[in-house]
Image (cartoon, grey):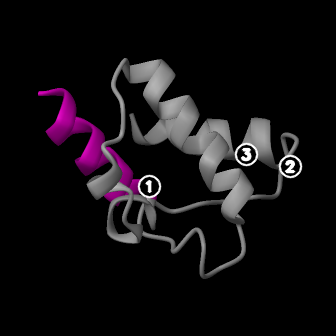
Amino acid sequence: MKELITNYIINEIHGGDPDLEIAPEDDLLGSGLLGSMEMMRLVEHLEQTYNFRVAPQDMAIENFMTIEAMTNYVTRVTA
């Protein structure tokens, strides 16, 4: 799942930038890798790919700040 999320960010949001490297623990918002609109695209992608809906109370930065956090969140809500 981590690799799929990373590939989506690199290919769909950053146009396949070959020099872009993202570690699972990188702060995606704080580093500027994702803005709010890109984050919403990514959340929509996760919902469609893993067939779930993010509950309003789960729309917290802690669940989406890093690829690691997203992976943990999606695993938890789809279990």
Outermost residue, front side: 56
Q: Are marks 2 and 3 in contact (CB under 8 Å)?
A: yes
Q: Residues within 10 Å of mark 3 (few under 14, many from 20)?
A: some
Q: Is residue 17 above or below residue 19?
A: above
For the point 77% across and 37% down, the residue is 11
- 49 inside magenta stretch: no
Q: Nearer the viewer, mark 1 or mark 2?
A: 1
- 74 inside magenta stretch: yes
Quick one: 5 or 53, which is closer to the camera?
A: 53
Residue beneath label 3, please? 10
Q: Residues within 10 Å of mark 1 (few under 14, many from 20)?
A: many
Q: Earlier in the sequence, mark 2 or mark 3?
A: 3
Q: CA distance from mark 2 to mark 3?
A: 6 Å
Q: CA distance from mark 1 to mark 2?
A: 18 Å
- Mark 2 secondary-structure assignment: loop
Amino acid type at circle 2 is: Asp
Q: Position of residue 26 (x, y in %)?
A: 50, 71
Residue beneath label 2, please? 17
Region of the chain picked out in magenta, as a range: 67-79
For the point 20% across and 28% down, the residue is 78
Q: Which mark is residue 27?
A: none
Amino acid type at circle 3 is: Ile
Q: Quadrant of the C terminus?
A: top left
Q: Position of residue 27 (x, y in %)?
A: 52, 74
* Image quadrant assignment for residue 1: top left
Q: Are marks 3 and 1 in contact (CB under 8 Å)?
A: no
Q: Which mark is residue 67?
A: 1
Number of marks drawn: 3
Q: Position of residue 8 (x, y in %)?
A: 64, 36
Q: Is residue 8 shown left or right of residue 46? A: right
Q: Is residue 17 shown left or right of residue 65? A: right
